[in-house]
Amino acid sequence: MNLMKKPLKASTKMCLLLFYSSLLLMFAAVFSIADDGTSTFQSIRDGETVVSTGGTFELGFYSPDASNRRYVGIWYKKISVKTIVWVANRDTPLTDLSGVLKVTNPGILVLNHNMSTIWSSNTSRTAQNPMARLLDSGNLIVIDMSDDDSENLLWQSFDYPGDTFLPGMKLGRNTVTGFNWHLRSSKSPQDPSQGNRTSQLGPKGYAELFVREGSVIKYRTGPWNGVGFSGSPQFNPNPIFTYIFVSEPDEMYYSYKLHNSSIFSRVVLTSDGLVQRYTWIDRTKGWVLYQSAKIDDCVNYALCGVHGACNIEESPVCSCLKGFTPKFPKEWDLVDWSHGCVRKTPLNCTGDVFQKYSGVKLPSTEQSWHNKSMNLKECEMVCMKNCSCTAYTNLDIRDGGTGCLLWYGDLIDIRYTAENGQDIYIRMAAAEQDHEDDTKINAKYSKSNEKKMRIIISIIVLSTGLLILGLSLLFYVWKKQHQKGGKLGRSQNEDLELPLFDLMTIVSATSNFSIENKLGEGGFGSVFKGTMQDGQEIAVKRLSKNSRQGLNEFKNEVTHIVKLQHRNLVKLLGCCIQEDEMILIYEFMPNKSLDFFIFDQTRRILLDWPKRFEIINGIARGLLYLHQDSRLRVIHRDLKASNILLGSEFNPKISDFGLARSFGGIETKAETKKVVGTYGYMSPEYAIDGLYSIKSDVYSFGVLVLEIVSGSRNRGFSHPDHKLNLLGHAWMLHTEGRPLELLDASIEDSVTLHEVVRMIHVGLLCVQRNPEDRPSMSAAVLMLGSEGALPPPLKPGFYSERDMSELEAGHSSKACSANEVTISLVEAR
């Protein structure tokens, strides 16, 4: 019987169709959990997963690394690196694969293991048909399918975040129920159990976020001012995300939203208490640190105590507010500022005045009061009438300022900040305020007295300084004459005008020059990070005992940099010349060097155009100071990306003066038989003929400008359409009217086009072949900051890659510094 060849009846076909359809639906119901067919479920077992509707997030069981601990967690589905953003049973891991996550009839999520409940959610009401659903935001919710109101949730994971803050989550409090949305750190990246760091809205006062270790406050953002967090520019709105602050009668919270849904960005409270934002870079398949709350020592809560203010640009960083004095002067002199400051003159309430401070991070608002409708004058009147009111300001800085924020009692955790700082008016006794005299005679008399006083003080200070300097010089000469094994020798003793550090102090600060503290290594020796007893971080440059290179550079750097003081030059704190050691101590630069960012495919995104624009201008100001405004006319001779160090807010500082040369009078150029520097940055006349001048530095600056704009190195640059180096490529694009094609693609969304075009133009003027055609740094600074017409640039020096190769071959015997580590770089180059 060949039944298979007989035609099937219509009824039989319908039965088979229904059977296969049912079978298909059954398989879909089973396997949709493991795939992304549905985001709704009633239960899943270990080995099964649920994927959100849009495929962004996935829920299931996982183990950290290779451990046998099993957790229910949510992670990103669309990226290759498994990144957990929420964990249910973070404190009670399973030990095998028998776990089941299910929704019970009342509407509660329960994690069962061998008939025992390991973890469960809660609900405020019962449900007829409860189901769980994973949303594309990463929020796991429980809903009643019989409830027509989709917003009427029984429970949601966004109310119970772990250590990760996702877009749409809340950090704040419900003022009616007292419910608190907060982050709690994990013990470690491999252990999701709860750590002892929390990030949450303050329990009282106006809204600002605090990070605590246990009950101790470690950091706060500053209050919301309508634009961002006061004094916390690292969390300001930017092209990637915008913070949102909601203040309603029943709740107050912060949230944030991404401008582009295709970008993955998350905030993490780390196990050591840092609040850090990471952004996924698909090109490099990795997370990049985009922002961090820890930018310098001044973010440490109450570092300067009550009525003290922190200024990271000063040394020491703490000072008392005007009208205040250290409570314990001896402790203050020993850099123990924790007890803060007290008033010089007590307040008398009715006769007090308000001193205006600008550019500050507002004090902690735990003892504060606010009103949204008042103006600043009304705010002042309210504060003046209340003897307990110590300061006031606008609540919102937009549109000229609105609202009122008052403080009561002590003012704590104030810092000066150039970016995102605000005005505040602080109460003080009238006797402590500076008054302007009403008449011109009194004003003239006052100015005359002030001028005389300044002259007297200057004479006293100068005399005292000369006396101290003379004694220091005598002590230094005596010490060098009696010190055995010194490398400088008696004939080379100089007045270094520089603090001398004891070797044991440096050994202690660097943990005996431990490998863990090593930042990098160069021809001179190694660089280490150190921490002094007062908590100050330093960078320690240690001359290698076996180095044939570096002794002259060491002496040269001490000779030059000690005489230079500028905000765009790295600060030399002191030196140590003891036994067989020769050590330089610098300020520590937390953001390493410029090349660490602009030449890295992942980190370059952190330097958007506004930052690069400021970096270029900062380098230009530093060079102008060296060439024109310093005590010596200094030519750096090794200006390059690795010698530009970046401060806490990416402010640039020129470093490494080991190859620098100085001139007196009107001298601006010289000749040498030994060419030193770095290929790719050296000017043609210097590399070929040994002629160097201030225009040699201008050439190096031009190379830097083009590298910063393009994100590419000059040396080693390649293009598929030609064999030009970066300078030649930039000049070709400029002459063809296509300069914007040079721009680093990673910062296109943040640029101001006319600024970019002008930067490229100025950069090309600086790298012209003939030194006489290049502008001086004073002219370059003027060009960068003006809108006037610029002359057309001529062909740059070292126009092609072949020229560079021939140069290297023809001058292989000349000394040339490699692109090696500078004092703040963690990775060797």
Image (spheres, rainbow, N blue to C red):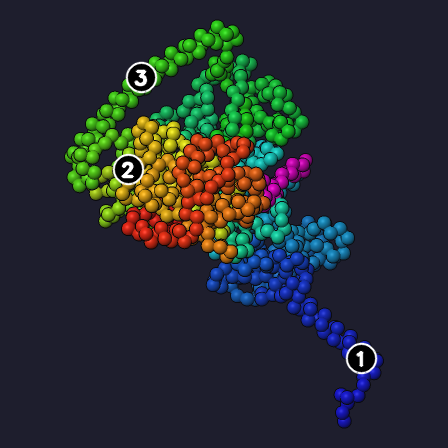
Mark 1 Cα-neighbour bin, 10 Å: few <14, some 14–19, many ≥20: few
Q: Which mark is residue 460?
A: 3
Q: Which residue is label 2 attached to?
A: 556
Residue 636, relative to residue 517: is it above or below? Answer: above
Based on the picture, tell me whether residue 243 belongs to the magenta stretch.
Answer: yes
Q: Which mark is residue 13?
A: 1
User: Cα distance, mark 3 to mark 2?
Assistant: 32 Å
Q: Amino acid at mark 2?
A: Asn
Name the spot of residue 116 as percent of width and height, x first.
58, 62
Question: Between residues 384 and 375, which one lies in front from this camera angle?
Answer: 375
Magenta region? 237-256
Name the spot of residue 66 as percent of width and height, x first.
47, 63
Name the spot of residue 723 as percent of width and height, x first.
46, 54
Between tags 3 and 2, which lies in front? 2
Q: Provide the secondary structure element on which disc 3 rests.
A: helix
Q: Amino acid at mark 1?
A: Lys
Q: Provide the secondary structure element on which disc 1 rests.
A: helix
Question: Between residues 188 and 707, which one lies in front from this camera angle?
Answer: 707
Q: Earlier in the sequence, mark 3 or mark 1?
A: 1
